[in-house]
Image: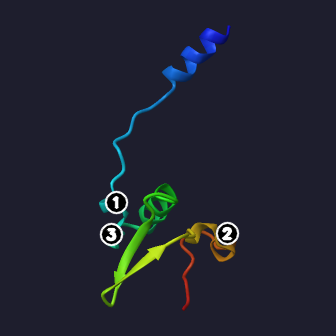
């Protein structure tokens, strides 16, 4: 039974390409969900960063708007006032 379990664990493994530090730069042209998922997926290594006024800023954490209390209280298509 132990051998079968170890074989099953190997069969369920997936392969992905090795992460590179170059992938940690945030592309602000992506939609918000993609940026949020990139921050989640690349934390803690290689992390994510952006440049602002020529300085490198590390991004440690993100939050999706859909998780906010305002988004949960609103129905789809509701106007947002700023």
Question: Which is more N-terminal, label 3 or label 2?
Answer: 3
Local packing at callout 1 (Cα closer than 10 Å; few below 14, some 14-19, many 20+) is: few
Residue 68 rendering spot, x and y as whole percentages = 64, 72
Quarter where residue 20 is shown = bottom left
How far, Cα to Cα, is label 1 from label 3?
14 Å
Q: Is residue 11 above or below residue 62?
A: above
Element on which disc 3 rests: loop
Question: Which is more N-terminal, label 2 or label 1?
Answer: 1
Quarter where residue 73 is shown = bottom right
Residue 19 rendering spot, x and y as whole percentages = 36, 50
- The residue under label 1 is 21
- The residue under label 2 is 72
Work out which quarter of the rendered image holds the N terminus and state it: top right
Question: Which is more N-terminal, label 3 or label 1?
Answer: 1
Tell me if 19 is positioned left or right of 36 in this view: left
How far, Cα to Cα, is label 1 from label 2?
35 Å
Tags 1 and 3 touching, CB below 8 Å: no
Element on which disc 1 rests: helix
Tags 1 and 2 touching, CB below 8 Å: no
The dot on residue 60 is: none
How far, Cα to Cα, is label 2 from label 3?
27 Å
Q: Which residue is drawn at 53% across and 70% down?
A: 60
Residue 70 rendering spot, x and y as whole percentages = 66, 77
- The residue under label 3 is 27
Q: Which of marks 1 and 2 is in front?
A: 1
């Amino acid at each position: 039974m132990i051998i079968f379990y170890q074989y099953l664990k190997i069969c369920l493994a997936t392969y992905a390409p090795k992460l590179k530090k170059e992938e940690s730069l945030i592309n602000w042209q992506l939609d918000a969900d993609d940026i949020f998922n990139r921050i989640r997926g690349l934390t803690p290594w290689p992390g994510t960063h952006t440049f602002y006024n020529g300085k490198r800023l590390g991004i440690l954490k993100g939050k999706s708007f859909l998780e906010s209390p305002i988004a949960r209280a609103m129905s789809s298509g509701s106007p947002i006032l700023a």
